[in-house]
Amino acid sequence: MSQLKLSKDYWSSQTVFIMAAVGSAVGLGNLWKFPYITGENGGGAFVLVYLACILLIGIPVLFSELAMGRSGKANPVQAMANIARENGASRLWTLLGFNGVLAGALILSFYTVIAGWAVAYFVESLQGGFIGIDAKGVGEHFSHLLANPFELLFWHTLVSLFTVIVVSKGVKSGIEKAINFMMPGLFLILLVLLGYATTTGAFAQSFNFLFAPDFSKLTWQAVLIAMGHAFFTLSIGLGTMMVYGSYLQKDYSIVKAGLWIAFADTAVALLAGLVIFSIVFANGLEPGAGPGLLFQTLPVAFGEMTGGWFFGTLFFALVIMAAFSSSISLIEPAVSWFDQNWGIKRTKAAWILGGLIWFIGIGTVLSFNEWADVHFLADRTFFDSIDFITANIMLPLGGLLMAVFVAWVFKDETRQQELSLTAGMMKLFLVVLKWITPVAIIVVFASNLVSEEN
Ligand code: PFF
Ligand code: NA
């Protein structure tokens, strides 16, 4: 029997773990992606499907993934090897780990590009560039940024470099500190923006757009996107939470942590949506504007409100931090795999991976200008293709396999030891994990294959 490869670092407390996991979950997915895909997919019904996916798929998979990580005590590839052996299952389960390592790297390749937009906006805001700006001015500013591949490449490079430097410094020192003030700060500033949103005169319209479902607009493609986003936003299905769980001490509650992560993540997304669509409707903008939505709306608020320079600059600083705490967690499955399985030290691993991810990211940079009309998967740009393959295929597939593993392969004692549920709750959890979560994922996949409505 080969030597078990274990994670040796532990989180210094339950709170630190929750903060880091929330830091991974809350990011561009909430502030940038959720609003724009909600706008593109017609609002209410899409949001309702997304919330149902969080509840019936996301939370059960999150519990499962954390439990698998703590039980497997290693990076996703090795953790799968460890728990497959311990539970008498096939070595093929390690493929689930590879899927995650690859998905994390692919997501990071565009994540740094979008985080780069936030850095560009931070600098612009700091210099007073958004003072008194109106919707038209913001729109022009954004188109200008996107049209310039070298500028995008510059910010993408800067963010990639910074990610590599933070990651090479290790789990604890790198992640723990910044998150402590980033999360509360982000929440507070969203509340300030919510206050502003109520003065725009379009708050009720925004609320209705998000929460009044119109199912006639819903397609299976939209359901797949909503489901994919539930995985993306909770950082599940690819092994990030598995690695984070591997650093988790035995007596910490996975269920409690998981519920906090899901709650905080959902709250931030809905708040961001409410604010952004208030600005959209108050200024006659297009809800389906696409990936630029956040960047074409929020500066309007900062341009108009009192203290706009301060709040705007602070907001983009917080977006950058939220993006960083997620970027770090996206590369962590691969870095810990290099480290534990190949003996490639953290620093070297971070540089190798960072370089590769930076290179793939150039495709995303170009997809907003030079390659805007070059199509890869069906009618998708390079960016849209990578986003689609990862969020809508690789993560749900990974999550499906995780649910199956914990429901069907885990020994009863292991499952109980990791989750410490009462007998009644465990019964309920198992019903969901065996019959609802996997079936829902398969139905959504299958419906998309059958109905070619894209
Ligand atoms: N959950 C992050 C967000 O919503 O921005 C993105 C992400 C981070 C996805 C880490 C996956 C992951 F492993
Ligand atoms: Na998120």
Image: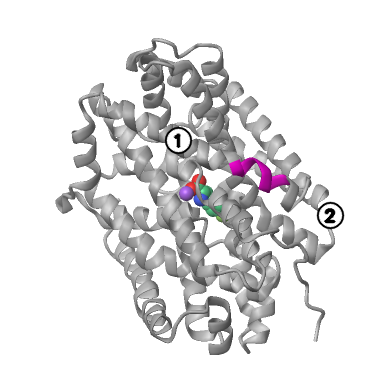
Q: Quadrant of the N terminus?
A: bottom right
Give the amino acid at mark 2.
Answer: Lys
Q: In which image quadrant can residue 51 be found?
A: bottom left
Q: Residues within 10 Å of mark 1 (few under 14, many from 20)?
A: few
Where is residue 80, by image quadrant? Answer: bottom right
Indicate the secondary structure of the residue bearing disc 1: helix
Quadrant assignment, res 281? top left
Q: Nearer the viewer, mark 1 or mark 2?
A: 1
Q: Residue at x 62, y 57 (%)?
A: 17
Residue 213 coordinates in the image, percent (x, y)? 18, 50
Identify residue type, mark 1. Leu
**What residue is disc 1 on?**
188
Residue situated in front as seen by the camera: 299 or 424? 424
Of 157 and 239, which appears nearest the observer? 239
Q: Which of disc 2 and disc 1 is earlier in sequence?
A: 1
Secondary structure, mark 2, is loop
- Image location of residue 288, percent across then percent down: 30, 35
Residue plotted at (36% across, 21% down): 301
Magenta region: 174-180
Horizontal side of residue 71 vs 307, given as left or right: right
- Mark 2, residue position: 345
Q: Is 246 placed above or below 316 here? A: below
Q: How many marks?
A: 2
Name the magenta segment's main secondary structure. helix
Q: Position of residue 149 (x, y in %)?
A: 57, 24
The residue at the point 54 percent across, 33 percent down is 318
On whether ligand 1 comes within 8 Å of the CB at mark 2, the answer is no
Question: Quick one: label 2, few (<14), some, or many (20+) residues within 10 Å?
Answer: some
* In the image, residue 179 lies in the stretch drawn in magenta: yes
Please report the residue visible at 30 percent of the width from the left and 29 percent of the height from the top: 197
